[in-house]
Image: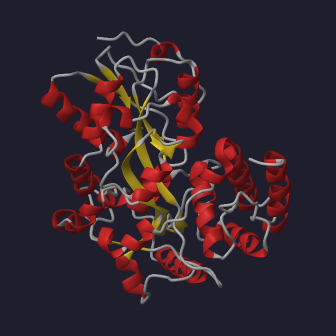
């Protein structure tokens, strides 16, 4: 039994949601709120029953930006307080020096069966610093009942989405739902906006901010046009409040029956179909739109499980990681929570496909998702993303045009890069 101390005394801006239980054999951070946290707790309980060990589950800020800040403070203090951390797909390079090489404990074949691209993403200097847990890509949710009622098919382009959203929004408001909006997404100035904006830019043919060789590519007319189009939604088909939405705020509006379209991750499917949902049985899911010479683009998301190098029980922690990332647990999470497995075999599992049909229909979307430029920018990625979502937020809020914001961003990224990232 290990005494955990830092979690009860650490003061971190934005980490008010951090909770702390009694000391146990292990401590894991694997969720923030709602279904994400509940599914983790259930998986941990199953492992406890199987092994007889005890585990504290601590919740962290819902914002990935705030969660990263919390982890960095804990790890930089060489704290033993959290043994296992749920880390974003863009964090392995940032945190690698503080994380255990899982192959040292679980063997050379630890990543076998998982999507090779994610295993490669999580391998830093030949060290597997995180185990794939679930993968993600942005998708478009829509009210299938309303599109049918108004005579529309799911949109293929952003321009079609804009027109359809406006017409149905206005029609529903005239019919008495004054709270109806056409489109909700993640518009707060945080990592989620980087994901949304990268999709807008890439689907317009504007590239990926920084290319695979580390060259800055964001200052182009297609990128500027993409952000200007998104800005035109604010106060029209999207509420002004979307400028402060994360995933859960957007889901709350859509699931409450007050949005025609929503951009979100696959996890929202199970919640939209749950008992008590205002849109149960009324939702469709498709790939995100494109514009001009672009093609549909979905930002690669997903989360992994990593073991802190400062854990007092690293072997036991790695065993829990292997259990949570294993086939049985990933299948349960896919069926109950619509979390995309990282094990390729589960995309051919009949029970999984029955529970989440679009896992099969949008398989290519998930395996060909657009990566954020965390690999070419290395340790600078956090600053690159912050500069990008801040510039995007300025465009959405009307303080800068897309052209001016992308020009300014180009100069800012050049200063960050200097000779090399």
Would you place residue 306 above or below residue 240 in this image? above
Q: Looking at the picture, tell me which residue is in the foreground, 317 or 403.
A: 317
Seen in the picture, residue 361 relative to 248 is either above or below; the reply is below
Q: Quadrant of the N terminus?
A: top left
Colour mapping used in the image: secondary structure
- The residue nearer to you, when weighing 206 against 356, is 206
**Residue found at x 32% / y 14%:** 23
- Residue 187 appearing in the image: no
Query: What percent of the width, then of the height, locates residue 24?
Result: 29, 17
With respect to residue 364, does 41 lie above or below?
Answer: above
> Can residue 266 be seen in the rendering of this structure?
yes
Relative horizontal placement of residue 366, taking residue 219 as reference (left or right): left
In this picture, residue 333 sits left or right of residue 116: left
Q: Return the x and y of residue 163 as percentages of the image width and height.
A: 58, 82
What residue do we see at 81% from left, 65% from top? 401
Q: How many marks?
A: 0
- Residue drawn at x 44%, y 11% is 5
The answer to which image quadrant residue 237 occupies is bottom right
Q: Does residue 350 appear to the left or right of 71 in the view shown? A: left
On the image, which quarter does residue 353 sit in? Answer: bottom left
Residue 264 picture location, percent across and down: 46, 60
* Residue 270, horizontal then vertical, whole percent: 30, 58
């Amino acid at each position: 039994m290990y005494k955990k101390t830092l979690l009860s005394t650490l003061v971190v801006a934005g980490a008010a949601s951090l909770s702390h239980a009694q000391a146990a054999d292990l401590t894991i951070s694997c969720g923030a709120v709602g279904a994400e946290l509940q599914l983790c707790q259930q998986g941990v309980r199953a492992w406890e029953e199987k092994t007889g060990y005890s585990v504290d589950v601590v919740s962290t800020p819902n914002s990935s930006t705030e969660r990263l800040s919390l982890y960095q403070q804990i790890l930089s203090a060489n704290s033993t307080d959290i043994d296992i951390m749920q880390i974003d797909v863009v964090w392995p390079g940032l945190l690698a020096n503080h994380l255990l090489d899982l192959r040292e404990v679980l063997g050379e074949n630890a990543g076998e069966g998982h999507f090779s691209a994610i295993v490669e993403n999580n391998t830093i200097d030949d060290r597997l610093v995180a185990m794939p847990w679930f993968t993600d890509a942005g998708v478009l949710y829509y009210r299938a009942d309303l599109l049918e009622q108004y005579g529309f098919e799911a949109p293929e382009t952003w321009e079609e989405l804009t027109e359809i959203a406006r017409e149905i929004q206005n029609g529903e408001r005239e019919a008495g739902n004054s709270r109806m909006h056409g489109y909700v997404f993640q518009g707060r100035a945080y990592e989620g906006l980087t994901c949304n904006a990268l999709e807008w830019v890439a689907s317009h043919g504007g590239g990926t901010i920084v290319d695979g060789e580390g060259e800055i590519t964001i200052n182009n007319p297609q990128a500027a046009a993409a952000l200007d189009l998104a800005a035109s939604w604010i106060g029209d088909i999207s509420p002004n409040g979307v400028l402060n939405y994360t995933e859960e705020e957007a889901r709350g509006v859509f699931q409450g029956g007050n949005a025609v379209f929503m951009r979100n991750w696959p996890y929202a499917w199970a919640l939209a179909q749950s008992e008590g949902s205002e849109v149960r049985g009324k939702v469709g899911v498709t790939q995100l739109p494109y514009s001009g010479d672009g093609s549909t683009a979905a930002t690669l998301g997903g989360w992994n499980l990593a073991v802190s190098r400062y854990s007092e029980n690293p072997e036991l922690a790695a065993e829990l990681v292997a259990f949570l990332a294993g086939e049985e647990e990933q299948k349960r999470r896919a069926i109950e929570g619509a979390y995309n497995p990282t094990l390729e075999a589960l995309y051919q599992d009949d029970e999984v496909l029955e529970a989440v049909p679009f896992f099969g229909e949008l398989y290519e979307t998930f395996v060909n998702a657009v990566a954020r430029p965390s690999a070419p920018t290395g340790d600078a990625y956090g600053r690159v993303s912050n500069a990008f979502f801040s510039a995007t937020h300025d465009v959405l809020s009307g303080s800068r045009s897309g052209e001016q914001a992308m020009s300014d961003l180009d100069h800012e990224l050049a200063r960050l890069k200097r000779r090399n990232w």
